Image (cartoon, helix red, strand yellow):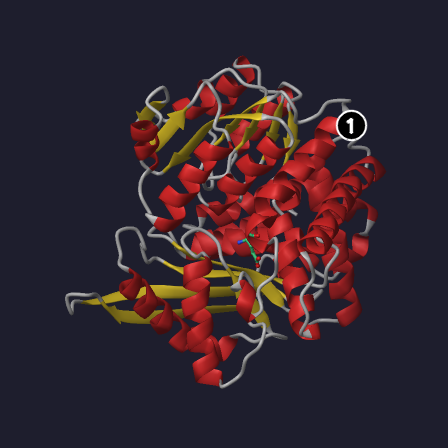
Amino acid sequence: MEQAIADCIGRDPEQREFHQVVREFLVSIRPVLDRHPEYRRLAVLERLVEPERMILFRVPWMDDQGGVHVNRGYRVEMSSAIGPYKGGLRFHPSVNLSIIKFLAFEQVFKNSLTTLPLGGAKGGADFDPKGRSDTEVMRFCQAFMAELFRHIGEDTDVPAGDIGVGAREIGYLFGMYKKLQNKFTGVLTGKGLDWGGSLIRPESTGYGIIYFAAEMLGRCGETVAGKRWLVSGSGNVAQFTAEKILHLGGRVLTMSDSSGHIYDEEGIDAAKLAFIKELKNVRRGRIREYCDQYPQAVYVPADPVLGWNPLWHYPADCAVPAATQNEITGQDARHLVAGGVRLVCEGANMPSTPEAIAVFREHAVLFGPAKAANAGGVAVSGLEMVQDSMRMSWTREEVDTRLHAIIRAIHRTCLDEAAAYGREGDYVAGANIAGFVKVASAMLDQGLV
Ligand code: GLU
């Protein structure tokens, strides 16, 4: 196993995020490898850490002033062992091959946990949509799809949104795909409701996180109600995480964007959350504007040289990091513990550094890893694919009920698999083992391909 990690580092020494996620994963599946020597003999790990296919492409586009820009586009198709490639697209200046590979690797096992037949992929571009006009975003999406279209399809690879790619971008991407292929298919998920989208898809990641957190709390005889929650981020995941916390009677104290965070001791209620949704989704403004509307709240600008984020030092009971990778450092984790936080449920992909996870483990903080806790988004994407194939749509209640059932099943599977390998209550081990076993056995069934 150490050999698989060493090979990974040796082959691409600069891909730090990818090494981080592979190391975390491989360490927790060691007991499975010991019980199943065939996985080692047939080099399952060596195959899993090498993507089935990586597509890198040029994306040239023109801004509103006639200036020409060139970005780099990515699609990493990591595994099709259990279904067509599936995973989001991220448009953010930090995007590089390491980040897309880490996300694609996580996606393989997350998708496996959903109980649906979905392989794993991720893609995106180092394009920054911040401050760009609608027409610039449209031209970028069209240029991006002008290459991506030849690699994807409803039975091959089905992209969706992620950071920087929401309903608006999915619309422009879908329009261009349809024009180029002359086919109206469910090639993307997160589509608009009138053209193949699913009810509850926008809410699904956030709602799923809190359904998962509620299951974790339920095991200890606790509920979401009455608890103080620290939430980071203010995009799609954070918004619907906050909404479900409010539905279940919890109190949300914080939200953030890349410029800073707001802390509202009175709690962000439904009306305040509606303000944030309008601010972020329609006006595309900054979270600091919350304090113009609600002056009792505090705005704290982000300070990248600090090495820790003051958002995580407020006294609270539970935390959902829903911004981006590695946002909780070891120091942040110590602040969370000191502030009384007993549960951390990951909303973003890999938001906790390995040091932070070690701190949570040391202090017995209930810890829900992203690939289990945030699987609700891709699960409802899977349900969107089902509805598209049937050319039918389910009601809100039907989709929400299925989402809830999937999250309960994931929670149960994590606990059962952890227990089967002597790691009672360890959600990290349980999620990794359960995700892995299904993919690995499909790989063995299908031979060396
Ligand atoms: N980007 C989301 C995730 O990280 C959703 C992917 C999808 O729906 O395909 O799971």
Residue 47 picture location, percent across and down: 63, 62
Ligand 1 quadrant in view: bottom right
Front in this rendered view, residue 21 or 222: 222
Residue 172 falls in which quadrant of the image? bottom left
| Residue found at x 47% / y 34% | 271
Considering only vertical position in the picture, is 291 above or below 439? above
Camera-side residue: 61 or 236?
Answer: 236
Q: Quadrant of residue 139?
A: bottom left
Q: Which residue is mark 1?
A: 219
> Callout 1: helix, strand or loop?
helix
Residue occupying the far front of the picture: 271
Which x, y percent locates residue 5? Answer: 57, 48
For image coordinates 36% across by 42% down, the residue present is: 279
Q: Residue at x 47, y 17 (%)?
A: 314
Q: Position of residue 344 (x, y in %)?
A: 59, 29
Q: Is residue 20 above or below residue 342?
A: below
Report crowding for label 1: few under 14, some 14 to 19, many 20 or more residues within 10 A (C-alpha). few
| Image coords of residue 311 (percent x, y) | 42, 25
- Kindly tell me whether mark 1's CB lies below 8 Å from ligand 1: no
Q: Is residue 386 left or right of residue 276?
A: right
Q: Amino acid at mark 1?
A: Arg
